[in-house]
Image: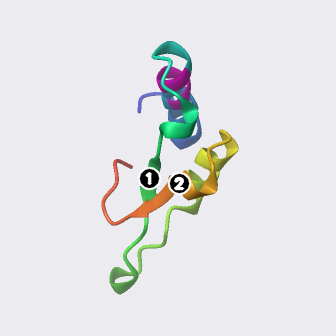
């Protein structure tokens, strides 16, 4: 992501979607990496928390087996 990482990428993405494009916040869902226990890869709790810090409802923040990060 160039000179920024998860926190900034999430903030920029949320701003783009909600302020620039004007998408309704209550209709958006986001994902974070669920991890891979069989291979010892943990859940991406950092990304999850950054999404929650944007004010997204916890039931709109979903763990996923595959994710962009």
Mark 1 and mark 2: Cα distance apart in space: 6 Å
| Above/below status of 60 relative to 38 | above
Which numbered disc, 1 or 2, marks the residue that appears first in the sequence?
A: 1
Q: Quadrant of the N terminus?
A: top left
Look at 41% across and 81% down and name the residue there.
40
Residue range in magenta is 14-18
Look at 57% across and 62% down and name the residue there.
45
Q: Is label 1 in contact with label 2 (beta carbons under 8 Å)?
A: yes
In the rendered image, residue 48, in percent from the top left (x then y), is placed at 57, 55
- Residue 53 falls in which quadrant of the image? top right
In the rendered image, residue 27, in percent from the top left (x then y), is placed at 49, 38
Name the residue furthest left.
Answer: 66
Q: Which residue is labeled 1 in the image?
A: 31
In the rendered image, residue 30, in percent from the top left (x then y), is placed at 46, 47
Q: Nearer the viewer, residue 17 or 38?
A: 17
Q: Regarding mark 2 in the picture, which secondary structure is present there?
A: strand
| Above/below status of 68 relative to 9 | below
Name the residue furthest top.
Answer: 20
Q: Which residue is labeled 2 in the image?
A: 61
Would you say residue 28 sits in the magenta stretch? Answer: no
Look at 51% across and 62% down and name the residue there.
44
- Residue 37 falls in which quadrant of the image? bottom left
């Amino acid at each position: 992501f160039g000179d920024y990482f998860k926190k900034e990428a999430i903030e920029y993405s949320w701003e783009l979607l909600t302020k620039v494009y004007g998408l309704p916040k209550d209709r958006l869902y986001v994902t974070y990496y669920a991890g891979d226990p069989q291979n010892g890869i943990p859940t991406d709790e950092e990304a999850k928390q950054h999404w929650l810090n944007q004010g997204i409802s916890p039931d709109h923040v979903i763990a996923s087996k595959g994710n962009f990060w």
